[in-house]
Amino acid sequence: MTLDDVFTTFKRPLNDKDKKLITQAWEMAEEAHRGQKRRSGDDYIQHCLATAKILASIGAEPKTVAAGLLHDVPEDTEVTLAQIEKKFGPEITLLVDGITKLSKIRLRGSKEEYFLENLRKMFLAMAADIRVVLIKLADRLHNMRTLEYNPPDKQKRIARETLEIFVPIANRLGIGEIKDELDDLTFKYLEPENYKKIYEHGAKQYKEKELYIEKAITEIKSTLKKEGISVNDIHGRVKRLHSFFRKLQRKDMDENRIYDLIAIRIIVPSVADCYETLGIIHKTYRPMVGRIKDYISLPKPNGYQSLHTTIFGPQGRIIEVQIRTQKMHDESEFGIAAHWMYAENEQRRWRDYFWPGKKKEVKKLDEKKIAWIRQLQQWQKEIGRDDDEFLEGLKIDFFKNHIFAFTPKGDIVDLPEDATPIDFAYSIHSEVGNGTTGAKADGKMVPLDYKINNGQVIEILTTKDKKTPNRDWLKFTRTSNAKSHIRRTLRKDDQI
């Protein structure tokens, strides 16, 4: 791999200043790592170039790519951070320093302690500058691609850490391209027998499915053209190996009960075109009842937007169809990194997001994407003194799948699965939570430990006379926000 491979991977044209910056970073890294080899036998600089190329592929801007080239220099060579700062300034140095700190994580003590320490350091990095985490994800992806050169015990340790920490973080940042590949690579090393079985099973059918996808795409494209729909792109895919295996487990290993083995993605110019395309697809092919999802009007917590439908496509075979705009597609594939592809006219620095004193305007979409990081920072301040509480809440809030519920006025509340009306109440305001006396779901009375379903309208019944939460609520609340408010109020009243 060469530096030209990195340049040609960028999602937008580079000016001479950007190219000079990246070239200088490569020159320093190449000289610093000269003579060093990877376990694979490759020159070490190949890892730096691979990391930079991954960053360029997900839409990262030049300074992040330069930091990606330099990310192992202070730890593995004689070159110091002071020397990097002298040549590249404080911003790139901050990124490289953040990566250096993350790289010092080592397994020690119990799995839970190790897990907690990794997460804490990750989030501290996020709080300082989100680009550090993007570089770490790119670094980890290339390390996973070359994991075969490590001894078996190290393979399993790195794969387990990747599955428990890096895959969920890539998912929460909305970087589907990295998340999916990391997920499959961990499957290969953590469950080799199942991986081999699924791989061999898939290999037999993969070619046939690919041929079918090509025919289906041709037919759908022709149908949309006749109806006057302009299509930016249309492509298909067969379900990823680990995802396929997990679904098989949930469906009693019955492949016939999995409806998204084959998916076709249609990218159109506008949101209006998305809905019009959906109508044409349903007019042409019979949709499967209960399999239509509108993630455009109701995005997923990580910002993902698309229309999903499952149809009986050409030859009557089941296909999942995803319809989205180009911007939605870029954000789905590259997540928060896609920001740079849509900010060419804005001089905004990532640190502006995390220091409220800055008065720069931030787009609504970007705010949604980083809202969970803000919540995490606030929560960590409130309950950081209790490691067990932090870890348990983190597992629920950060890693669990999320649902959306509505207030009676139509406002959306983002909650983890199995959340209760008490969680809902505290997400609105602590006083609403403390004063809760009852709840309704879709107009019907429900108990306070009721598990809210996605899309339900939740009404909280309160009284001004009641200001103290019930201690028993701690047994069934799911969110750290609710638990911390309940505990804090009870402590004030000397009840715990």
Image (cartoon, grey):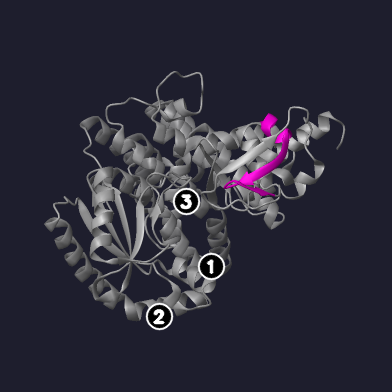
Residue 360 on image: x %, y % = 41, 21
Q: Earlier in the sequence, mark 2 or mark 3?
A: 3
**Residue 349 figure quarter:** top left
**Residue 158 figure quarter:** bottom right
Specify whether 390 is left or right of 151: right
Q: Which residues are magenta?
A: 430-446
Q: Is residue 124 magenta?
A: no
Q: Which residue is mark 2?
A: 201
Q: Secondary structure at mark 2?
A: helix
Q: How many marks?
A: 3
Residue 185, above or below 412: below
Q: Is residue 443 magenta?
A: yes
Label 2 amino acid?
Answer: His
x 38%, y 49%: residue = 51
How far apart in space, not on screen, are marks 1 and 3 (Cα)? 28 Å
Image quarter where the C terminus lies is top right
Residue 320, above or below 330: below
Residue 443 visible in the picture: yes
Image quarter where the N terminus lies is bottom left
Q: Earlier in the sequence, mark 1 or mark 3?
A: 1
Q: Which residue is mark 1?
A: 151
Mark carried by residue 171: 3
Q: Residues within 10 Å of mark 1 (few under 14, many from 20)?
A: few
